[in-house]
Amino acid sequence: GEIKYWRTFQKTIQDTYKEFKPDGLDEYLKKEARLFNDKAFGYIRDIETEFKADFKERLEEFFGKKWFEKGVPPKIAEKALVDAMSKNRELEDDDEEVEPWDCLTIIAYREIALKNWQNIFEKEYTKPGEEKISGGKEEKTKWMVKLERIRNQNFHSYSVTEEELSFLEELHDWIVTKELRNKFQKG
C-alpha cells in the first residue's frame, strides 16, 4: 500500500512537472498497467463466456427451437452468419468450426437484450441500483457499451485504468459470480 501511495503521488507530480523523473517510476507504471490489463482481460473473457451461455439459454427457453431466428435482430444474425462462414473458410480441421453464435460481440449481445428487453433480459441485466433510472432500456444497458469500449481497447495495446478495472470487477461480481451462485443453488 505504501509503495502504491508514493508511486501515485510521484505520478501526479510527473503529470504536472514533466522533468520530474523519479527512479523506477516508469517501470512501476508499466508493470501496473500490465497487471490491470491481465486482470481486465480475464474479467472480460469470463463476462463474454457468461453472456454466450446465459443469453442462449434465455432465448431458447423463451422462443424454443427458433431461438436464433426469433431472438437475434436480423442485422446481428446476418453479421454473425457472415463472420462464421469467413472464419470456417480458413479452417483445416472441421472440429474447429464455429457457429454464428460464437461470433457475437458485446454490442451484439446488447442489441439482443434491447430487442427482447421486457420479456427476457430486463430483470437480470439491469445493474443493481439502476432499476429506476430514466431513459429505459437504452440507459440501463449503457454499461455494455462501456464494457465493449474497454474490451476493444484492451485487445489493442491499451492500459486499463484502475477505475476501469474496478468497473470490470463490479460487473464480474454481478454477472459471473451471481450466475455461479444461481447454478450452484439449482444443482
Image: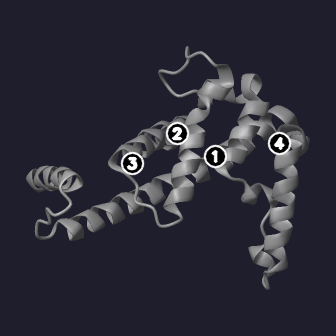
Q: Mark 1 and mark 3 in contact (Cβ < 8 Å)?
A: no
Please report whichever mark, 3 or 2, sits nearer to the chain's N-terminal start: 3
The disc labelled 4 sits on which kind of residue?
Val
Under circle 3, the secondary element is helix
Q: CA distance from mark 3 to mark 2?
A: 15 Å
| Mark toward the viewer: 3 or 1 | 3
List x then y, in percent, for residue 101: 77, 55
Callout 1 crowding tier (Cα within 10 Å): few <14, some 14–19, many ≥20: some
Local crowd size for mark 4, using a 10 Å CA cut-off: few (<14), some (14–19), many (≥20): many
- What residue is pinned by disc 2? 175
Q: Earlier in the sequence, mark 1 or mark 4?
A: 1
Q: Are marks 4 and 2 in contact (CB under 8 Å)?
A: no
N-terminal of the pair, mark 1 or mark 2, is 1
Assign the C terminus to one quadrant of the image: top right
Determine which residue is flagged by label 3.
165
Please tell me whether mark 4 sits on a helix, a strand or a loop. loop
Position in image of residue 117 (x %, y %)? 73, 27
Tell which circle, 4 or 2, labels the residue nearer the N-terminal end. Answer: 4
Label count reads 4
Res. 72 mark: 4
Q: Is residue 41 above or below residue 71?
A: below
Residue 137 x %, y %: 67, 25
Of 100 and 54, which appears nearest the observer?
A: 100
Q: Gap between marks 4 and 3, in whole Å?
A: 30 Å
Answer with the quarter of the image where residue 7 lies. Answer: bottom left
